[in-house]
Image (cartoon, grey):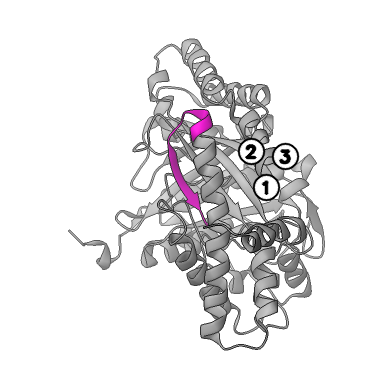
Amino acid sequence: MINVHDILETVDMIREKNLDIRTVTMGISLFDCISDDKDRLKVKIFDKVTRSAKNLVSVCEELEKMYGIPIVNKRISITPLSYIGAGLSPEGFVELAEVLEAAAEELGVNFIGGFSAHVQKGEILGAKNLIEAIPEALARTNRICSSINVATTKAGINMDAVARMGEIIKKTATLTADRDSIGCAKLVVFANIPEDNPFMAGAVHGIGEPDTVINVGVSGPGVVAAAIKEAGDCDFSVLAETVKRIAFKITRVGQLIASEASKRLGTPYGIVDLSLAPTPAAGDSVAEILENMGLEMTGAHGTTAALALLNDAVKKGGVMASNHVGGLSGAFIPVSEDRGMIAAATDGALTLDKLEAMTAVCSVGLDMIAIPGDTPASTISGIIADEISIGVVNNKTTAVRVIPVVGKDVGDSAEFGGLLGYAPIMPVKQKSCEAFIKRGGRIPAPIHSLKN
């Protein structure tokens, strides 16, 4: 039963500790739009998306007023477009991106995710042509996000795709060089991509999902940081219990919004994603949580252990608060979107190697990391291969969203604006991995994938 203390506590979380619903994302299936006539396909996609999500923004605004809970983003995810436009040329996929951009503008949503392909064992023609279209599509649009799944624990790693994505990221950076290569901030490479993720840039509407669905991503690093600070000098068992209890309360807010949005939109409720998603705002930082545990600065020895405790406790608290938990669910560590991470990277305490180690225990991977613009494509592919292998071997989702900022080097910073924030340019290894990447083929699945 809700009491006055619970209500006042939630009000305090919202007003003083940056609690918000980070996104309400409507997933939309486009399979019924498939047509061998490109113009007909474009019309059907625009009509399906705008018809399905016509009330998404207005309903979210109603819920904000009704409950006093900020809903920061209203987003859409679609069926991976490589399946829907399987017969299109790269130019045809760019045209579909522009159609989706027009739909996003009409609806007033922040992003549409799903300019995507699954290529963990190889490429169908649609996937090959969509990948070729990514740089131009992201350069011509502002609200379209792209994700490519290059590996799974069951299939292993498609190293041909990994090599190609290094080249695609470089080209995307060049085509958006006038905006600090921001196109790469809308592009992510995955292992074990989830099919119900509400967060960008990796949101897609999986092929096993209903025709439409509502998925909600909650956030509240400021709330967790404050709870840990208030807990004081306690041992780790008490610390974990503190995080677990506050994660339960945060997730209950997400469950409420998901249920109400689902009812008002006449759309099934899918999942609540528990992820602690930071912003560049003061007091909204995952790094601050780790530092409140006792680290002088994120990146110090002990950081990976602190993040492991945080991630596990968030999951344990969240699953008790919602019947359906999904997406990524844990703690995000995007460098450009977290003030504490930015400070640690600028200081040199947080390096690419340390971030890679941290991703073994957190929700996703190397996220929103700016690197020198002259970084070779093969080095970017090596960064991807290292991170993706962590996901494959550990049977978890990992991803890479790196931004080679054209014209900038270590010591400079890149400005992306809004929730994407800003980032110091981080150094990468100078030794080459080009011969390794050129081998091509597939890295086989690990032995523990044989579970049948």
- As for residue 173 lying within the magenta part, the answer is no
Please give the residue where the numbered disc 3 appears in the rendered image: 176
Of residues 14 and 110, the one nearer the viewer is: 14
Q: Position of residue 85 (x, y in %)?
A: 44, 24
Of residues 209 and 38, the one nearer the viewer is: 209
User: Marks 2 and 3: in contact by CB < 8 Å?
Assistant: no
Question: In the rendered view of the protein, which quadrant contains the C terminus?
Answer: bottom left
Element type at marker 1? loop
Whether 92 is drawn above or below 13: the answer is above
How far apart are labels 3 and 2 at the CA level? 36 Å
Residue at left offset 43%, top offset 42% = 270
How far apart are labels 1 and 3 at the CA level? 35 Å
Element type at marker 2? helix
Query: Outermost residue toward the left?
Result: 452
User: Mark 2: which amino acid?
Assistant: Leu
Label 1 Cα crowd, 10 Å radius (few <14 / some 14-19 / many 20+): many
* The quarter of the displayed image where residue 46 is located: top right
Please give the residue where the numbered disc 2 appears in the rendered image: 63
Label 3 Cα crowd, 10 Å radius (few <14 / some 14-19 / many 20+): many
Give the magenta-colored segment's residue range.
263-275
Q: Which mark is residue 287?
A: none
Please give the residue where the numbered disc 1 appears in the rendered image: 69
- As for residue 274 lying within the magenta part, the answer is yes
User: Mark 3: which amino acid?
Assistant: Thr
Is residue 433 shown to the viewer in this render?
Answer: no
